[in-house]
């Protein structure tokens, strides 16, 4: 897998009888590109991720999504999702050991798990806990801070050998240090992966290779950050989208 993604006149509905949420989008994303997805709440940003994971029945979609020139509807769900990695907006942790949360299928050595924890600067905290990798994580990760839970999710993503990473950027309860650390890890450690980020702040997407501006289920702009944000042909609504991002409203 190289990580090339193509949306070809793609339409997405939550059910076949409903109106489309994505209304015929076309996107070409090259391997290793870092792409920020922005737009107002309800514009269709999260539907792009749901479409990639095939979370709705094929009858509710039209057009194609191809990964490395293969229509994702022609492969099994397990094969498709093996090639996709996600860091969700809210940390997803299980009431189990730290080891299980990092490596639920027991594919990695303890040394590899510690390397991943080191990459997200959690090795010192975790090594101070007597049980180390056997530390029990409470339900919803309640015995760790939200930032620490998010870093555990990033460490888990580092251990999965997929070429495509989807990130729904956290919007709340993450301190500035942790936020900057996560952005740094994504830039440095996922450099050989295609990364799509649903972005809620301008400072995040300014680091992207390209930005997609989604409005009312359509691609309103796609290109380099400076070109998209400075595009004088953007409508007033599009500019409001960007203004909202600057205010942290998305």
Image: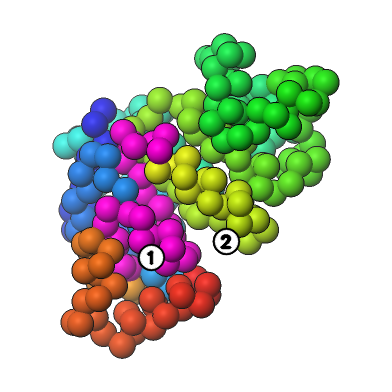
Residue 197 point in image, percent of width and height: 41, 53
Helix, strand, or loop for circle 2? loop
- Tell me how far mark 2 sits from mark 1, CA to CA: 13 Å
| Side of 171 where 205 appears, left or right | left
Quadrant placement of the N terminus: top left
The residue labelled by disc 2 is: 171
Residue displayed at 58% across by 28% down:
118
Helix, strand, or loop for circle 1? strand
Observer-nearest of 56 and 89: 89
Residue 170 position by quadrant? bottom right
Observer-nearest of 129 and 20: 129
Residue displayed at 42% across by 67% down:
202
Which region shows up in magenta?
188-214
Residue 57 seen in the current view: no
* Mark 2 or 1, nearer chain start: 1
Whether residue 9 is in magenta: the answer is no
Crowdedness near tag 2: few (<14), some (14–19) or many (≥20) residues, C-alpha within 10 Å: some
In the depicted structure, whether residue 79 falls above or below residue 17: above
Residue 172 position by quadrant? bottom right
Residue 211 point in image, percent of width and height: 29, 61
Residue with the most extreme bottom position: 236
In the depicted structure, whether residue 206 falls above or below residue 154: below
Residue displayed at 48% across by 30% down:
158
Residue 130 point in image, percent of width and height: 83, 21
Whether residue 204 is in magenta: the answer is yes
Residue displayed at 28% across by 64% down:
225
The residue labelled by disc 1 is: 38
Crowdedness near tag 1: few (<14), some (14–19) or many (≥20) residues, C-alpha within 10 Å: many
């Amino acid at each position: 897998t190289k990580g090339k993604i193509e949306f070809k006149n793609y339409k997405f509905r939550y059910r076949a009888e409903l109106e489309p949420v994505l209304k015929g989008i076309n996107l070409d994303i090259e391997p290793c590109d870092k792409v920020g997805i922005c737009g107002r709440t309800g514009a269709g940003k999260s539907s792009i991720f749901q479409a990639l994971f095939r979370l709705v029945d094929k009858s509710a979609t039209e057009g194609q999504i191809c990964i490395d020139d293969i229509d994702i509807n022609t492969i099994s769900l397990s094969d498709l999702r093996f090639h996709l990695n996600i860091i969700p907006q809210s940390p997803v942790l299980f009431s189990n050991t730290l080891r299980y949360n990092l490596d639920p299928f027991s594919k990695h050595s303890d040394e590899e798990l510690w390397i991943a924890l080191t990459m997200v600067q959690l090795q010192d905290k975790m090594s101070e806990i007597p049980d180390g990798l056997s530390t029990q994580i409470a339900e919803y990760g309640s015995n760790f801070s939200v930032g620490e839970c998010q870093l555990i999710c990033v460490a888990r993503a580092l251990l999965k050998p997929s070429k495509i990473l989807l990130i729904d950027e956290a919007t709340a309860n993450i301190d500035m240090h942790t936020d900057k650390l996560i952005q740094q890890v994504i830039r440095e450690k996922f450099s050989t992966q295609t990364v799509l980020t649903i972005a809620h702040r301008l400072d995040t997407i300014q680091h992207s290779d390209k930005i997609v501006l989604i409005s009312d289920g359509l691609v309103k702009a796609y290109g380099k950050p400076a070109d998209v944000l400075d595009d004088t042909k953007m409508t007033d609504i599009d500019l409001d989208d960007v203004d909202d991002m600057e205010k942290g409203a998305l």
